[in-house]
Amino acid sequence: MNATAIPVRRQFATPQAPASPFPYHPGSLLSVQDLNLEQVSHILARATALENQDPLSRDRILAKRRVALLFYESSTRTRTSFELAAKSLGADTALVSSLSSSIEKGESLKDTGLTLRALGAEAIILRHNSSGAAWLLEEATRLPVLNAGDGMHEHPTQALLDLRTILAHVRPGVETVAEDTLAGVTVTITGDILHSRVARSNMLLLPRLGARVVLCGPKELLPDLAANAGPGISIERNFETALRQSQVMMMLRIQAERLAGLQLDLEEYKAGYQLTGDRLRELAPQAVVLHPGPIIRGLELTAGVADGPQSAILEQVRNGVAIRMAVVERALMTAADVRGTK
Ligand code: CP
């Protein structure tokens, strides 16, 4: 062959998109897609090991390491559990909230991140109202960044703690996950899917373990296009049909702060999609009920369901601390360090 000739197959090959440089830092967690199933299994196993470890020895794992929590949106569960998780491992934490910092004076995310790094932060946990903010912060600081929720995009640690909760109910004792771990399990996510980073991260994670994910809600909150989100994902508009098929019911809050003028008839919504005790008893008496919180009692679910025997909502909250201990440890320790703590 002539030295300059290009093989026909290469001439017409579709150009490949350049490989993403993200995450720059191996300890970052920007998206659930950053993790392969082996890494998911490792996080699940470390969560259990750290939860069971004597607090006095656990306290030495990240003794005096510095973790910054940078929160541009309100949070109860994620912020508190990340802070308790980092402190349980012995780390020092500093909270910067958009309402009481120089962010109010117009300081950019990049400059805030660089300032935190200059102050000695070794990892940053970020919640932000803009999708993609965690990527921008990681690029600017090159520190490990843990995405604690970016706009309507992702909430990867929520998906991991949801997975831990689901496994405890449908596959008790299983921590090493594979492509068929959740085969035969239907998870229905109901409510404001359009605005939900929790739904998105779960949709990106659960089908990879073989789960069937059914999305349920009115068109205003769940566009038809969502059915094309990926393999294992479908739409069922009829809530009662979805309930009948489900082992896991994940209910979502209507995110009034993101509706941007969209009018929704709440009485109509409740008639169609509220999870009531009667519906649950009659159509899915064995299903486990999840909700990422905050819950609005009397809207997406009744108080009786929230407090009832099928609810695992507070279990999710508890799992948040264990999962976030594992994720903070991963952010600050090399693989060799982690092996040494086992
Ligand atoms: N699940 C969740 O993100 O709750 P918070 O907004 O209270 O952190």
Image: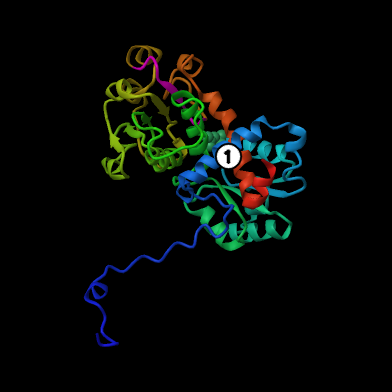
Q: Quadrant of the N terminus?
A: bottom left
Q: Tell me if residue 285 is in the magenta stretch.
A: yes
Which residue lies most toward the front here? 1
Can residue 76 be seen in the rendering of this structure? no
Residue located 30% across and 23% down the image = 245
Residue linked to disc 1: 74
Q: Tell me if residue 288 is in the magenta stretch.
A: yes
Is 168 placed left or right of 286 in the picture? right
Q: Vertically, is 278 above or below 77?
A: above
Q: Vertically, is 101 above or below 79?
A: below
- Asked if the residue at label 1 sits under 8 Å from ligand 1, the reply is yes
Magenta stretch: give its range: 284-293
Estimate the x, y position of residue 3 in percent, counting from the top left: 29, 87
Residue located 34% across and 26% down the image = 269
Mark 1 surroundings: few (<14), some (14-19) or many (≥20) residues within 10 A: some
Q: Nearer the viewer, residue 118 or 286?
A: 286
Estimate the x, y position of residue 7 in percent, counting from the top left: 25, 77
Q: Total label count?
A: 1
Is 202 placed left or right of 16 in the picture? right
User: Quadrant of the rendered structure where residue 252 is?
Assistant: top left
Is 92 placed left or right of 253 in the picture? right
Estimate the x, y position of residue 194 in percent, counting from the top left: 37, 40
Q: Amino acid at mark 1?
A: Ser
Is 254 placed left or right of 40 in the picture? left
Q: Secondary structure at mark 1?
A: loop
Q: Nearer the viewer, residue 131 or 49?
A: 49
Displayed-image quarter of ligand 1: top right
Can residue 74 be seen in the rendering of this structure? yes
Q: Nearer the viewer, residue 160 or 222?
A: 160
User: Quadrant of the rendered structure where residue 11 is?
Assistant: bottom left
Q: Quadrant of the C terminus?
A: top right
